[in-house]
Image (cartoon, grey):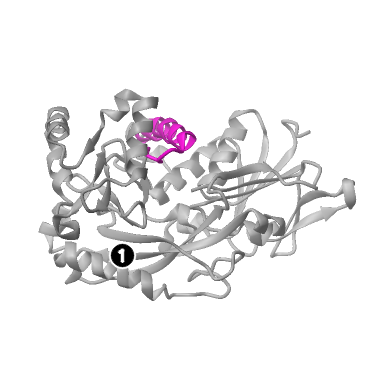
Amino acid sequence: MVASESQIIIVGAGVFGLSTALWLARAGYKNITIFDRSPLDEGKYDPSKGCDGASADINKIFRTSYGIQEHYEELAIEARDVWLAWNEAIRHSPSSQLPAGLTPEDQLLDLCGIFFLAAGETMPDLYKKSLDLMEKRDAASRRRQFVKGNKEDESRLYEIDSKWGMPFHALDTINGHDTCGFLDTQGGIMLADKACLYAKYLCEKAGIKFIVGSPQGRVEKLIVEGDGSNKKIAGIMTFDGQTHLAGLTIVADLALGGGWTADIIPEAHRTVETTAGTVVFIDIPEDRTDLQEKFDSRNYPAWAYEQGSVYQFSRSSYGTWAHVLIKTPNIRRTSTPRTRDTELPISTVPLKGVEILKAIIAKAFPELAEIGFTDTRLCWYIDSIDEEFVIDYVPGYSDTLFICSGGW
């Protein structure tokens, strides 16, 4: 049984690890240490400075629509309130009381809307189920979703706020004007790196300790003691040769967090698998103010195409427009992520993903096709077999090893 004074180790300083630590601290646990191999003190979660987990990318989609997965919807709606509260806290904080890299003008959640699109006139069942579930769970939230081509919905959208007129028609040219779907004004984009930065700041204020960077924050192995029914995890060994003991070790690696769970817990390969998505970036030139304005999140929503095979983000605060083709399958179910900053670096992405994204952009956004891709990368995920979260004690270790992973 873990007591409030017990030593707790959390492996992973992404969104899953940070939120786990923060809520444990708020529940009264006093001795929590987070380990992460990324140089977070210097990099500030900047993906261009070695922080290559997906949690710390420049932005992430935020949505409340999940088909028939009601618990995901409930979590998203609950989380939205937390994100908006953090927005307000940052807005009203003096710069001197915020962590370096964050200003009062930064908003972690930008409710610019998310458009769920599909080719043709018939809305996919997944989209229909998303609308039906929202109607069942929260009729007021359903009123914030607007079906493409529905004149009544469009009129209602303008009544709420005329600013939504431009985002509602921003994607009309996709697939030669032959699309269906709906705009959810409750969704948008997260400034993911800044969100992690602020969550880390809150953790530090709560007394949580951090050991980050390689080798001191990089986990080499779990420390196993005993055998049979007496086997337990006593802590971790890091790549600098140091041992760190704990009554409970938590490996926290979200689906959008990086994909290293099975590398640390071999048994996890039976439950989760690592996959990757192709991400391409288009840096809009500073002198193209017309494009800067057009693709700004004030005028342009995030969107998902073909039931989530392609996600696109509005122009971020970095002046970047990003496309992501998600979940490029692996040849093997078990894998360890490779990025530009891993021991065996990789700087290429699957040709198929690039070709799909080039085709979409060339047809729908020829002005961006002229600029071309300025960067590409792999975004690593860790998915459970049934696309559900895996949050539980790992069997066989006497409740000393806990896993927070998986998801959709």
**Residue that mark 1 sits on:** 281
Q: Residue at x 52, y 50 (%)?
A: 14
Can residue 103 be seen here? The reply is no
Can residue 253 be seen here? The reply is yes
Q: Position of residue 228 (x, y in %)?
A: 89, 50
Q: Secondary structure at mark 1?
A: strand
Q: Is residue 219 magenta?
A: no
Nearer the observer, 297 or 76: 76
Q: Position of residue 341 (x, y in %)?
A: 51, 69
Would you say 357 lies left or right of 350 here?
left
Nearer the observer, 220 or 125: 125
Which residues, given as a range, are shown in magenta? 64-90
Nearer the observer, 181 or 289: 181
Would you say 251 lies left or right of 132 here?
right
| Residues packed near mark 1 inside 10 Å, few (<14), some (14 to 19) or many (20 plus) | some
Would you say 346 lies left or right of 343 here?
left
Q: Position of residue 327 (x, y in %)?
A: 45, 60
Q: Is residue 67 magenta?
A: yes
Q: Amino acid at mark 1?
A: Phe
Q: Quadrant of the N terminus?
A: top right
Asked where in the image residue 273 lies, by quadrant, the reply is bottom right
Count of labels shown? 1
